[in-house]
Image: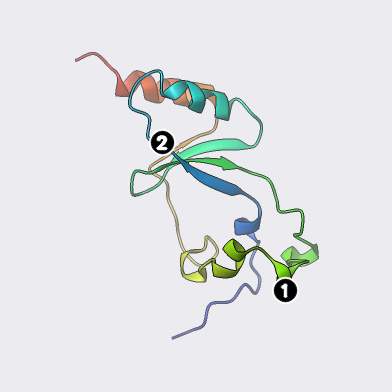
């Protein structure tokens, strides 16, 4: 088995942070999501398991030249335990839905709450 490394990686994992959010159930639940995506470099996505996330596309301030960590020995625990088996560089990853702006959210809401 080949050991996975960060060699030649473009450091996608160091250029954003994402947090799971509550799954919206009602039209009102989508108001915060509309607000999130109204901001630059913020997206909302639904992963393959159906969990909703807000993602802030912003690089780590310690990401240096050549996409190398400048504080590697004292990096945060989440960085130390990040599995290369799940990273974007070594794996294909597709979201069920990705929302970049209010219009995309509004279209999703329209379809989700379409009158039968």
Could you tell me how far apart the alpha carbons at marks 1 and 2 are, in whole angstroms? 34 Å
> What secondary structure is marked by label 1?
helix
Check the picture and name the quadrant holding the N terminus.
bottom left
Q: Nearer the viewer, residue 80 or 66?
A: 80
Check the picture and name the quadrant holding the C terminus.
top left
The local crowd at label 1, few if under 14, some if 14 to 19, many if 20 or more residues have their Cα within 10 Å, is: few
The number of discs equals: 2
Looking at this rendering, what residue extends furthest in the left direction?
Answer: 116
Quadrant for residue 5, please give it. bottom right
Looking at this rendering, what residue extends furthest in the top direction?
Answer: 115
Q: Is residue 58 left or right of residue 89?
A: right
Q: Nearer the viewer, residue 7 or 113?
A: 113
Position in image of residue 55 (x %, y %): 56, 42
Position in image of residue 33 (x %, y %): 49, 28
Measured along the vertical axis of the image, is residue 3 above or below residue 85?
below
> What secondary structure is marked by label 2?
loop
Quadrant for residue 65, please give it. bottom right
Upstream in the sequence, badge 1 or badge 2? 2
Position in image of residue 68 (x %, y %): 74, 67
Instruction: Name the residue located 38 percent from the left edge and 29 percent from the top edge.
Output: 24
Position in image of residue 75 (x %, y %): 69, 66
The local crowd at label 2, few if under 14, some if 14 to 19, many if 20 or more residues have their Cα within 10 Å, is: few
Which residue is labeled 2 in the image? 22
Measured along the vertical axis of the image, is residue 92 above or below residue 81?
above
Callout 1 touching callout 2 (CB < 8 Å): no
Instruction: Name the residue located 52 percent from the left edge and 60 percent from the top edge.
Output: 88
Instruction: Name the residue located 32 percent from the left edge and 22 percent from the top edge.
Output: 111
Which residue is labeled 1 in the image? 73
């Amino acid at each position: 088995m080949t050991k996975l490394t960060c060699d030649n990686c473009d450091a996608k994992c160091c250029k954003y942070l994402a947090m799971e959010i509550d799954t919206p159930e009602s039209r009102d639940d989508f108001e915060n999501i509309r607000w999130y995506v109204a901001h630059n470099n913020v997206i909302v996505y639904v992963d393959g398991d159906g969990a909703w996330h807000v993602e802030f596309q912003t690089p780590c301030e310690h990401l240096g030249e050549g996409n190398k960590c400048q504080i590697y020995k004292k990096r945060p625990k989440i960085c130390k335990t990040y599995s290369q088996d799940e990273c974007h560089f070594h794996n294909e990853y597709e979201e069920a839905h990705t929302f970049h702006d209010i219009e995309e959210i509004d279209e999703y809401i329209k379809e989700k709450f379409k009158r039968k």
